[in-house]
Amino acid sequence: MQIDYAKIGLKVGLEIHQQLATAAKLFCNCKPDLFKENPEIVFLRRLRPTQSELGQIDPAAYFEFQKGVRIRYEANRETSCLVEMDEEPPHPLNMEAVETVLMAALMMNAEPVDEVHVMRKTVIDGSNTTGFQRTCVIALNGCIKVGDKAIPIQHASLEEDAARKTGDEDNGKIIRYRIDRLGIPLIEVATAPVIYSPQEAQEVAFAIGKILRDTGRVMRGLGTIRQDLNVSIPNGALVEIKGVQELALISRVVEYEVQRQLNLLRISNELKNKVEPSCLTEEIVDVTHVFKQTKCKVIQKALEKRHCVKAVKLTGFAGFLKCELMPNFRLGTELADRARFWGRVGGIFHTDEMPAYGVTAEEVEALKKAANANEDDAVVFVADTAENTIDALKAAVERAREAISGVPAETRAANADGTTRYMRPRPGAARMYPETDIPPSLITPDLIEKVRLSLPEPAEKKRERLIREYGLNDKLAKQTVDSEYNTLFETLVQESRVPATVVAVFLTETLKALKRDGLPVEQVPEKQLQDLFKAIGTGEVAKEAAAEVFTWLSTHECKSVQDAVAELGLKMLSDAELTMAVDRVIAANKQTIDKLGKNAFGMLMGLVMREVRGKAAPDRVSGLLKERLK
Amino acid sequence: MSAKADSSGYKGEALNVLKKAGCAVGDVIRVTTREKSYEGILIPRSETGDTTHVVIKLKSGYNIGVHITPDTKIEKVGKGAKPTFASPALPEQKPDLPRVVIMSTGGTIASRVDYRTGAVRSALSASDLYGVVPELSDIARVDTQILLSLYSENITPQHWSQIAQATAQHIAEGVNGVVIAHGTDTMAYTAAALSFALQNLPVPVILVGAQRSSDRPSSDAATNLIGAVQAAGRAPFAEVVIAMHETVSDTAIVLNRGTKVRKCHTSRRDTFKSVNATPIGRVNNQEITMLTSDYAKRDPAKKLVLKPAFSDKVALVKFHPGLNPEVISWHVEKGCRGILLEGSGLGHVSKYCFGTIEDAIEKGVVVALASQCIWGRVNMHVYDTGRDLLARGVIPMEDVFPETALVKLMWALGQTSDAEEAKRLLKTNVAGEFSPRTLPETIGNEGGDAANAN
Ligand SMILES: [Zn+2]
């Protein structure tokens, strides 16, 4: 679909979050690290929505509370203490984290605030043991240049990362979270909603990401950076999309969201002529009897658990549920997402996709009859506990009603393919109140000066210096400074003593090529790159094998460079082994050598290298080859 | 310049500037300094904050502090809107439910946050409570009374008397149980005091509090309160207990006997532990389970005996290496009638203190001794030092830990002016404070609970 984004009036604002590479968490001295093992500590909690002075309670939170949803938290002793468990008040704000945000803020020309006040932002889904996220604004009113355009930065804030969800139990009545991630410091950078195309959104995100990396004080790798987007189009709605994990996905997420909203508007226009929202009733009927002999596996399984099948009619909706909104995502998917959230079910069925999944045409007929539906109507049905099916179908009906009026304002979560799914209703006015357990921190002129002095070198200066000090050519110097590994380059050269050009080419061209081939380049931690180049420096790994080792490491988490060398058979050949290889090639090409004489060298060199690439340095091969040819 | 703060918390320079601009908390103001300008709602300042910053809430919801210099300009842009809050309608009182009165002495067992200014207000009318903890309407017919509004560290023996009398009055009016909301710091002292003051109870008296303030979604206040009201309305015992979390999980509420319970952790939800005893019961999932058969039974026919007097002429002296024995003489000179020695180990105090102790006892001061070990029983027959102290007339407090022993001494001296009678009371088991047997309880069980909680 070709879309003129300027014409439709797209507006996007970005919120970039990135974990900071501090020694300790934001409000305690735990290691900012995740664990994979079984938890050492487990406890169960409930979060109770607190009333505002106006007596308002967040509806989604209240719903979950009423359903008795509980949270099972998992922890281990290395990554969590009583602070994360909400069993001890937070310690004072980690000033290392404040300085890092201050550094990024100054790089974005923002004005530091005079006194930092930590706030509590109510979050009641269990991702914070306290029921709120602690956050504080460090600087305001910045501005960065992206291309020729000035992008206003509304604020640079410092906040605690949330616990990570690891599953649920008991038909969704218990949600499991791991609190290792809770309390890891995050910087949040928010732009004004002045971005007008998907491409531009991505460019701005890249520019901000680059600034953050250039501080040299943020974490790297998947899961350390998360982007939230605010997307709106006129007549559509302001939709907040949370948790885009990859920068490269941003433009697609925006494109899909625009498509989704445009399609919803089109559907709404058609439906408005046909159906009144009030025609959609919540007359839920039990249709378990229809499926007594069903071949449908999902329903069979539910019935084995003595669950039931319930259905509801959507008047006038026949055909609409299969309308595609985004790739592989139909209006029916929207209904299913809602049903999952409010009804804790695995999914729903609807007649627009029937007969399928083992449900027969006869069953569909019987179902429609039971739901009192005619040709024009759709029927949604679901198999689960009675309570869950009713909640799920009510939510589906509610979503169908919204489809008549247009695009619902809501918070959505990003999927890995760029589509999004329903997450929760948009929260009302930001629920922020002061964190009284933490005293305000001053940002003094002295502190600002100290940070200003430690700001990373401006790109232009650094480029010149790399040319001067490391002998890089102009292009390579520019590429290095622009790359994600800007801060790592000098460390690698100094640690490994590998020629600077070799390091620079690898960090820029080689990695870019690998990334283009779909390699998860960012998953390889810096430490591994350091080890790799140290190994090249000592001759343990040939520089020609660097890409191969790196590729292997990117798909073998927690393995070492030495593991890669062993696994790939890249151990450097001994003199005897190399001599044997050279002699083998000479023997096999006896005739050619006799014919070409000295001119055979180039060809022989190529043949030997093909055999020993990555296991012997070329100069060593050529020396030996010359010697054996004598 | 006076640094005294007004109700907004502002003082000194900041207060002057705000006054001059005619700005009050809640107003929308603009603060302009040489480089920058901010607009937001004026927020109260913590009283411990300095005098040179003004706090505003930005439109984004964030608060920031703006430094005030002679160049700073403050203007009032808009007047603050008063929050209007309509209390939710009182739910129907179900006639078949037990009647429970909730008395508040302070702390915020239920509260609401003003998201505009961040102020926390306590919610203590019955309708407020039902609004915040709606489950209560299915558990009991609740009446509320605000008796005191004190942080628990400000509660004195006079307040214990007051609480005891108010409790007795409610019991006389026929309630099925009394719940007392109390700050947690000195809650165990009050629990011990009420245990001695309210004898032959017909119904339970439950103290309850919160380790996490009730303005946060994760507060333990509601779970504790629900457990307390359940116990007050339906539990089969009639004693003074503390009802708080059993573990760090929001599952079981444990009922610890008022004379045997101690605050053992500065911050955890399960801070209250029974010392030298097991808890007497547990409330879990609406279910009340008694953990011992050794408890006073609920019986509305029983006649309450009220003995609410406490003497505050009592001192606690903790023995430590290097203690100056004149501390004891000083207390005696100041008119002290009872001294609780917190001895070491099985119940010892260094010989160099014997002189002043003997002197005190000769002057009619009641001297008792409990162990600073907290867990275990005092035995003054094993070593010479113990035997010497006994010979001088020091009364061993058995397996009663120092805080309860101190409260008991205050109570005993409140009952009589006769030292011998006070000693007799001190040695009598009044409210389950002495257990005849010391059982192998686990002590200082930290962390293990959390790992086993489910
Ligand atoms: Zn910690």
Image (spheres, rainbow, N blue to C red):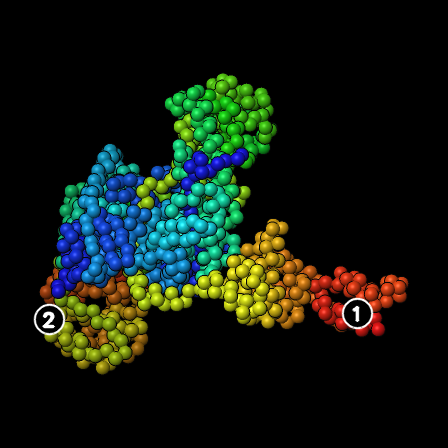
Quadrant in the picture for residue B383? bottom left
SS class, disc 2: loop
Q: Nearer the viewer, residue A491 or A224?
A: A491
Label 1 amino acid?
Leu
Image-based side of A427 in relation to B316, left or right: right
Residue at the (44%, 35%) spot, across then down? A8
Disc 1 under 8 Å from ligand 1? The reply is no
Task: Say whether mark 1 and mark 2 are on the same chain.
Answer: no
Percent coordinates x, y for residue B368 in the rendering? 21, 69
Percent coordinates x, y for residue A626 in the rendering? 80, 71
Label 2 amino acid?
Gly
Residue at the (29%, 60%) spot, across then down? A114
Quadrant in the picture for residue A495? bottom right
Q: Disc 2 marks which residue?
A: B335
Residue at the (54%, 36%) spot, across then down? A327
Q: Quadrant of the C terminus of chain A?
A: bottom right
Q: Is residue B163 above or below residue A375?
A: below
Query: Would you call the spot at circle 1 few (<14 residues within 10 Å), some (14-19), or many (20 or more)?
Result: many
For mark 1, name the chain.
A
Q: Disc 1 marks which residue?
A: A625
Instruction: Point out the frontmost of discs 2 and 1.
Output: 1
Image-based side of B37 in relation to A62, left or right: left
Percent coordinates x, y for residue A383 in the rendering? 50, 31
Residue at the (13%, 69%) spot, across then down? B337
Query: In this orientation, does residue B279 appear?
Result: no
Percent coordinates x, y for residue B248 in the rendering? 37, 54
Query: Would you call the spot at circle 2 few (<14 residues within 10 Å), some (14-19), or many (20 or more)?
Result: few
Query: In this orientation, does residue B94 appear?
Result: yes
Disc 2 under 8 Å from ligand 1? The reply is no
Q: Is residue B350 above or below residue A242?
A: below
SS class, disc 1: helix
Image-based side of A211 in relation to A620, left or right: left
